[in-house]
Image: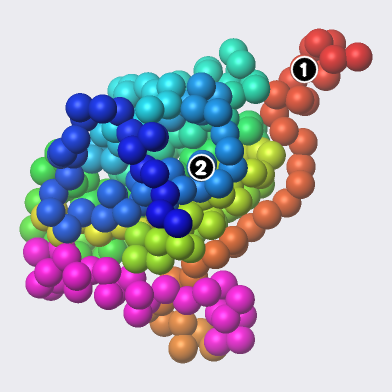
Amino acid sequence: MAYDYAKYLRPGKLPHIWCAGCTYGIVLKSMIRAIDSLNYDKNDVVVTSGIGCCSRLPGYVDFNTLHTTHGRSIAFATGVKVANPKLKVIALGGDGDMTAIGGNHFIHACRRNIDITVFVFNNNIYGMTGAQYSPTTPKGAWATTAPYGMTENNFDITSLAIGAGASFVARTTAYHATHCEKMIKEALEHKGLSVVEIINACPTGFGRKNKFKTPTSMLLWMKDSAVNVEKAKNMSPEELAGKFTIGVLHKEEKPEYLETYDATVGLKK
């Protein structure tokens, strides 16, 4: 049976502002299906965002939402969670929003292991503000601020999250819509800081200048480049060259920040 997406969308907010071929709509629907399957009360869900293309997503969904300043999605989400720990708090942002101007908030939220869920929409570019390079733009790729090709090394967002202390880290893609839904659901169910990197396509800002002739070709690149983490265990480095893994990359049970804080200051006996 099809999902009733309309019950999770705000009336009068569509059509959305995303470009034709953008994959953010796919992720939006995956997120809705995941939340619906968990039977969360809409009044108990909070979604925060910063600035960028994906930051418009909270405006379309009928939850408690905050569209905040650039890079501050996690900061606002942290404030909401501290004020009311019973809420299901989701912070989302693009690769630039989360790992450039918001990078400090990102690593320290991972370090604290506070119980919020972070979705990083990674399309390898600053899509909304003019196609400038971001911390995840591949070496050699074109951007308006790298007209001769990117010269810097790029972040591995999931390795950064694991190293900083996040207790749940996963990667998925917009092409793998069912898998994306599954990773989002598992992240929401996890107690602690959860990070899901979602590989997305920006055909306008990135694709047409980087040898992707159509939005479809970007989706097919995701299909061909993604390797399930379990399958990857039996592959050689040569076989994995040019590929990336998808699935749950790290999961551990560890003390959650608010519980530790309450116990430390004597709020819980």
Coordinates of residue 240 in the picture (x, y in percent): 46, 82
Name the residue: 66% across, 44% down: 190
Name the residue: 35% across, 60% down: 174
In this picture, residue 126 sits left or right of residue 232? left
Q: Which residue is mark 2?
A: 36
Amino acid bearing label 1: Asp
Name the residue: 61% across, 16% down: 84
In this picture, residue 193 sits left or right of residue 181? right
In this picture, residue 97 sits left or right of residue 74? left
Q: Tell me which numbered mark, 1 or 2, is placed earlier along the sequence.
A: 2
Along the line of sight, which residue is nearer the eye, 8 or 48? Answer: 8
In this picture, residue 141 sits left or right of residue 148? right
Question: How is this picture coloured?
Answer: rainbow
Q: Quadrant of residue 58?
A: top left
Comparing labels 1 and 2, the label whose residue is closer to the camera: 2
Give the magenta-colored segment's residue range: 206-235
